[in-house]
Image (tube, grey):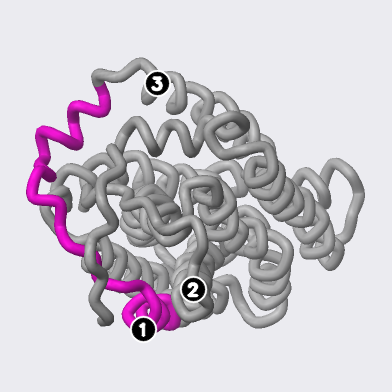
Amino acid sequence: MTDTLAPAPTILAPTRRSRANLALLALAVGGFAIGTTEFVTMGLLPEVAAGTGTDIPTAGHYVSAYALGVVVGAPLIAVLAARLRRKTVLLALMVWFAVTNAASGFVSEYGWLMLARFLSGFPHGAFFGIGSLVAASKVPKERRTWAVAMMLIGLGAANVVGVPLTTLLGQNVGWQAPYWVVGAIGVLTVVALWAWVPWQPLDAAASMRGELTALTRLQVWLALLIGTVGFGGMFATYCYIAPTMTELSGFTAATVPLILAVYGCGMTAGAFLSGRVAERAGAEASSPLTGFLERLHSSQADPAVTAP
């Protein structure tokens, strides 16, 4: 899994550029699916609570179960899959994602849904981590931050389109339907990854121990701390956005999808603009992310890439 970030040529040939764009699109589709399932439970929290026979505060545990799955799954998968090719891991993650999300729509008991949401969260962090490295390896050094931003734009797009539409679907058809839709998008992502993401040679030096050594670096812990504080605050608010808007602010349930779309517009604009700013200013100078990736994975000669 830790095959190195290979530097791409400064000028990409048209065919190679199109292949790189398709690979980024496949990763963005996966980000769209993950972003949709991550946030749709929050938009449908009252409906999920009613459908599983719990109150709204208790239904918030479903969101916590997914988050716990992310926390457990990301480091576990990073260590266990250290000697596997990145494409193999990405495919396995999205198969797992599709199955567990579809399963979430077939259970209605508190305990079973908690388990399904916990398992659904496993691929989340690992997909974005590995996907970021794959995206960065497909473009020249100065465009790596842009490439990662384009992959993550799928996450923002999920909040503009995916979450509002699946929330509307859940309100009118049933809270289980969005999970089935997300499962179907997961299957679509598997197909796209297989077709558009190239196979890369495995780094012979990759090992479980090598993955764990990252935890000895101060930069890693600082990055984790920033993410913990930032996302912790955001999710504490977003988790109960539906009941907050309807019960405290006086909005109708029908306006919740629109509110979610407005929120998602801000996320998407931020992801897009940050990528463009970093590309113009210079990746290392303006983006801690690219520098972080560079320090974790030394750049070597561009390995041969074979078609899937």
Name the foreground residue: 134 vs 262: 134
Q: Kindly identify which numbered label has been placed on residue 195.
A: 1
Three-letter code, disc 1: Ala
Q: Which residues are magenta?
A: 188-215
Q: Say which of 19 and 250 sits in front.
A: 19
Q: Identity of the amino acid at label 3? A: Gln
Q: Is residue 113 left or right of residue 206?
A: right
- Say the numbered circle drawn on residue 141: none
| Mark 2: secondary structure | loop
Q: Residue flagged by tag 2: what amino acid is it? A: Ala
Earlier in the chain: of badge 1 and badge 2, it is: 2
Q: Can residue 64 be found in the magenta stretch?
A: no
Residue in the picture at 43% in, 27% down: 224
- Whether residues under marks 2 and 3 lie with C-beta atoms below 8 angstroms apart, the answer is no
**Image position, residue 164 (x, y; %):** 72, 67
Dot 1 crowding, Cα within 10 Å, few <14, some 14–19, many 20+ = some
Residue 208, horizontal then vertical, whole percent? 11, 40
Question: Is 198 rendered above or below residue 207?
Answer: below
Q: Position of residue 249 (x, y in %)?
A: 89, 44
